[in-house]
Amino acid sequence: MNAVLREARATLVLAVPIIIGQLSQVLMSVTDSVMIGRTGTVPLAASSFGLSIFNLMFIIGVGLLVPVSVFASRSRGAGRHDEAGEYMRHGLFIALVASALEIALILLLSRHMAVFRQPPEVLAVVNPFLTLIGISLVPALAYLALRQFAESMGRPWVSTVIVLCSALLNVLLNWIFIYGHLGVPSLGITGSGISTLLSRTLGSLVIYLWLRRDPVMRAAWPPHWFAPLSWERMGRMLDVGLPAAGGLLFESGTFAAITVMMGWLGAVALAAQQIALSCAALTFMVALGIAMSVGMRTSEAVGAGEFARVRTIWLGGAGMGASVAVVLTVVFLTFGRAIAAWFVDDPLVISTAALLLVVAGIFQIFDGNQVINSSALRGITDVKVPALITLFAYWGAAVPLAYMVGIRWGFGPAGIWSGLAVGLAVASICLGIRLLRLTRAQARPS
């Protein structure tokens, strides 16, 4: 127990700035939802639908960039800082290629939106917003690669400040472009897309300039940016990144499928989901920050030849995550209706969102635990079996149950989210069993 507590304290020290950075990043989406919600239910519903497509693309990039933190942390643990910088350089190449392909796919989807059978009033306004946030994938994924490198090298605070400033800038730009101030016409939901693109672009530029000038990073900074890529290193990264992206895609695809189902129930259900999802995403960032810290610390332990520490690092992080989740669950159950009223004035949307927040309060306990378990497994480069676990949990359990309970049996939005809760519980339990088995035997993954 003393070893678990000791590792938990070390994880928390690294996790705090990461959590603040993650909260700041999600704060962009939350403030977008609040400020768009003030323009009406239909724009809020359109932002929910557009963001579900964006998030699906973004999460693929997140998975592909997992190797940056895994291998940079491992290189740092082994004392090879120059190697860590090379993993960052290769990660940026992956980010640029992935974002270009995803933007092309978004532009293609924008021409065939009718296939999703969403409310006509939503489809009428979503395309400009979706296009703008789609283009923001380039700076968003570039920033992610640079930030993961900084955190892996033990420098998390500056990237945290940068993303917090980006979130504040996004609020100011929303005020200008959504509502029409300082001589700019009122652009509504399209204005939110412009704000997101500008703030993300500036944030990625600032973190690059900081890393380039930081003396601490000098030993790890790549000396030749345009040197030929190492295809052996790229293959090693993709061997981890592709299964990780698959696992995250199964999860994110579930949320996208649930958003489409909500759209079948109308604009009110879609707007309510955006409120509840924004709140759940905000609290989820605490668990995600702990998970990222756990993943980097397990990677570093493996790089230093201390695999026996993996279980205690994981257990310390999981205990922290569960404690935080219980507190936040009480908040959602107690203040759900008041929270929903911050976003929109429509009483029907507020009551539906409050009900969804009750379900979110329950499922976030499982959601936080599964992301910590997943990150610990990625830290020891065990990614293929977890990807299959998530495929079963989300598409074998969550999506079918959400459809049956919410749509076929008529339980509506809360029924859809109940199916999601079951899938998250299955993922949490199965991933935990996988970790227990690997760390009990102290088997080094290949």
Image: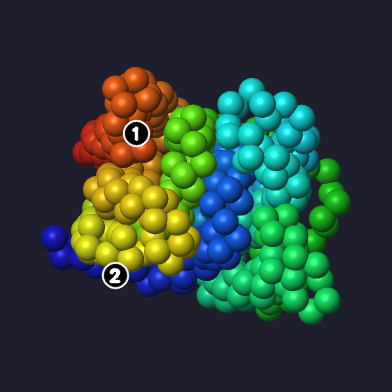
Of mark 2 and mark 1, the one earlier in the sequence is 2
Residue placed at 58% from the left, 48% from the top? Answer: 42
Q: Residues within 10 Å of mark 1 (few under 14, many from 20)?
A: some
Residue placed at 52% from the left, 63% from the top? Answer: 34
Q: Amino acid at mark 2?
A: Arg
The spot of residue 392 in percent (x, y) is 36, 23
Q: Tell which of 173 and 354 is nearer to you.
A: 354
Pointer 1 residue: 412
Say which of marks 2 and 1 sits in front: 1
Circle 2 — which element? helix
Residue placed at 66% from the left, 26% from the top? Answer: 114
The spot of residue 82 in percent (x, y) is 66, 59
The spot of residue 242 in percent (x, y) is 57, 32
- In the rendered structure, the answer to whether residue 115 lies left or right of residue 356 reads right
Quarter of the rendering occupied by the N terminus: bottom left
Q: Tell which of 150 and 423 is nearer to you.
A: 423
Q: Residues within 10 Å of mark 2 (few under 14, many from 20)?
A: some
Residue placed at 38% from the left, 42% from the top? Answer: 374
Count up the numbered dots. Answer: 2
Protein image colouring: rainbow
Quadrant of res 142: bottom right
Quadrant of res 57: top right
Circle 1 — which element? helix
Q: Amino acid at mark 1?
A: Gly
- In the rendered structure, the answer to whether residue 81 lies left or right of residue 94 reads left
Pointer 2 residue: 9
The spot of residue 237 in percent (x, y) is 61, 39
Q: Residue furthest front?
A: 347
Please indicate, yes or no, whether residue 312 appears anywhere in the rendered image: no
